[in-house]
Amino acid sequence: MHIENLKIFSDLVESESFSRAAKLNGITQSAVSQQLRAMEKHFNVLIVDRSQKQFRLTREGSKLYESSKEILHLYEKLNSELQEMKKVISGTIHISTIYSIGLHELPPYIKKFLQEFPDVNVRVEYRRSNLVYEDIMHNSVDLGLVAYPSKMRQLETIPFAEDELVLIAAPSSEVAKKRSLDLAELKGHRLVGFDSDIPTRKATDQIFKEANLDIEPSMEFDNIETVKRAVEIDAGIAIVPAATVKQEVKQGLLKSIPLSGTPIKRPLAIIHRKGRVLTPAMKKFIAMLSGKSLKAVSTNGTTP
């Protein structure tokens, strides 16, 4: 029995999917099934209850999963500590991020990080917010980057930045002539928004509610790039993170208009599973992103 067997088994249990476990480990579905049968033969127990339509562990399978997680945690912790002793900063960091952070906030950090630690490979996946949380909960990735982080018992959340929400409009529009705009003045304008399940949309809906404004977007999209393109052709105005439109404003493709009153901030955060062992490379990356010293990322692999 090898560590790899326990890793595949744990991924299978957490994802409840043979195809997902196969993808996570770079093997075929058939290989995952073979690994499971080999474990059942090795321990002489039934691990998965095959009489059920849904994936369900037997009592022995549950015990094996709990023990597998403990062994994997100790192995990862040992590996991380040995790397720290050798002062080795290498390996792969797998990140799942929402589009706006991944495309506009993250690149300068990655460039700086790779210049300092060239032996580290950083893999980035661009996902909807709910899928970033799913990736973290299934251990598909090491770190997640989200806006308006949700409080979850199983997650560690590390704030790393705040972005300001601004109003954007096509340069040829009447709105673009204004130096600033009060929220109340949005009424009557066509609004291009994010899909209703996206955190930034939920935040703007709450802002409108608190201002007693009944405003519904005339168009909805699931990512920032499509929202910007719609505004560029004057399909409406939109409220978006300032960092995501810097280039278009500079090029004259969009006009950014500050909203009157207190600036509306959008909090950004790093998330990872509680208890996850953080490699030296992950700790360095978190430290760079959050601006915290390495002392703020504890030696046992979790954040305070």
Image (cartoon, rainbow, N blue to C red):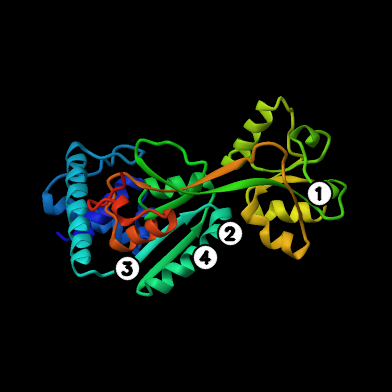
Q: In percent of the image, x 14 and y 53: which residue is there? A: 41
Q: Which of marks 1 and 2 is nearer the N terminus?
A: 2
Q: In this view, does 148 lie above or below 119?
A: above
Residue 3: x %, y % from top left: 19, 59
Mark linked to residue 269: none
SS label for mark 4: helix
Mark 1 or 2: in front is: 2
Instruction: Find the distance from the CA under tag 3 to the CA under tag 2.
Output: 25 Å
Instruction: Find the distance from the CA under tag 1 to the CA under tag 3.
Output: 46 Å
SS label for mark 1: loop
Residue identifier under label 3: 91
SS label for mark 2: helix
Q: In percent of the image, x 43 and y 36: which residue is there? A: 151
Q: Which of marks 3 and 2 is nearer the N terminus?
A: 3
Specify few, some or many for label 3: CA neighbours under 10 Å numbering under 14, 14-19, or 20 or more. some
Q: Earlier in the sequence, mark 4 or mark 1?
A: 4
Residue identifier under label 4: 108
Instruction: Find the distance from the CA under tag 4 to the CA under tag 2.
Output: 9 Å
Residue 111 vs residue 75, the one in the foreground? 111
Residue identifier under label 1: 235
Residue type at numbered disc 2: His
Residue type at numbered disc 4: Pro
Q: Earlier in the sequence, mark 1 or mark 3?
A: 3
Residue identifier under label 2: 104
Instruction: Find the distance from the CA under tag 4 to the CA under tag 1.
Output: 31 Å
Q: In this view, does 215 lie above or below 149?
A: above
